[in-house]
Image (cartoon, grey):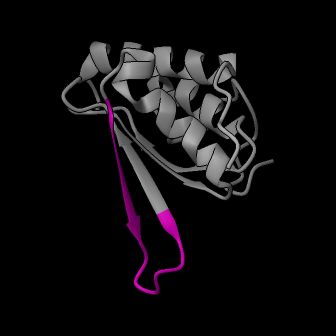
Amino acid sequence: MKKDGYPGPGTEIPGIDPEVIPLVDALNSIPGIYTLDTCSGHGSGQMSIFFRGERQRAIARVLYWFDSCHSGERWTVKARTDCGGRNITFCAESFPRVGEEAWASARHIAACLKAGSYIPAEQ
């Protein structure tokens, strides 16, 4: 189980919109990444997925695929910290895509993440 109690790929979780499950599965399959909260947008709003990363390379891999020049999908990823400056939380948003277009985009990014073809440069 992941830090957030995520039980594993393909598992139905009460309260999680089914449209976000492929991307949640893909993100949680990356060592050092775990999801916190999600919203599918319910057909009229943007999809949002909140996650944290414990390893810089894992975060770089996720950000790489949310970038339109690598996946062909246009998502934004915002970062914010808590009041103590200790924890960074990322929010990936499908804006301007909503509904079916956002869900298809999320499935494509999930496939890219699962393919594992990204190799981070040595630092």
Q: Position of residue 79 (x, y in %)?
A: 39, 58
The residue positioned farthest toward the right in the image shown: 1
Closer to the camera in the image, 12 or 10: 10
The residue positioned farthest toward the bottom in the image shown: 84
Is residue 24 in sight in this rendering?
A: yes
Q: Is residue 112 magenta?
A: no
Closer to the camera in the image, 69 or 21: 69
Give the total number of marks visible in the rendering.
0
**Direction from residue 104 to residue 107 in the image, left or right:** right
Q: Quadrant of residue 10?
A: top right
Task: Say above or below: 107 vs 17.
Answer: above
Residue at (40, 84) in percent of width and height: 83
Residue at (49, 21) in percent of width and height: 109
Q: Position of residue 50 (x, y in %)?
A: 46, 50
Residue at (49, 33) in percent of width and height: 64
Residue at (44, 53) in percent of width and height: 90
Q: Quadrant of residue 75?
A: top left
Is residue 16 in sight in this rendering?
A: no
Residues in magenta? 75-88
Closer to the camera in the image, 10 or 89: 89
Task: Say above or below: 42 vs 3.
Answer: above
Q: Quadrant of residue 110?
A: top right
Q: Position of residue 122 (x, y in %)?
A: 70, 43
Q: Is residue 79 magenta?
A: yes
Task: Say above or below: 19 vs 8.
Answer: above
The residue positioned farthest toward the front in the image shown: 123
**Direction from residue 2 to residue 81 in the image, left or right:** left
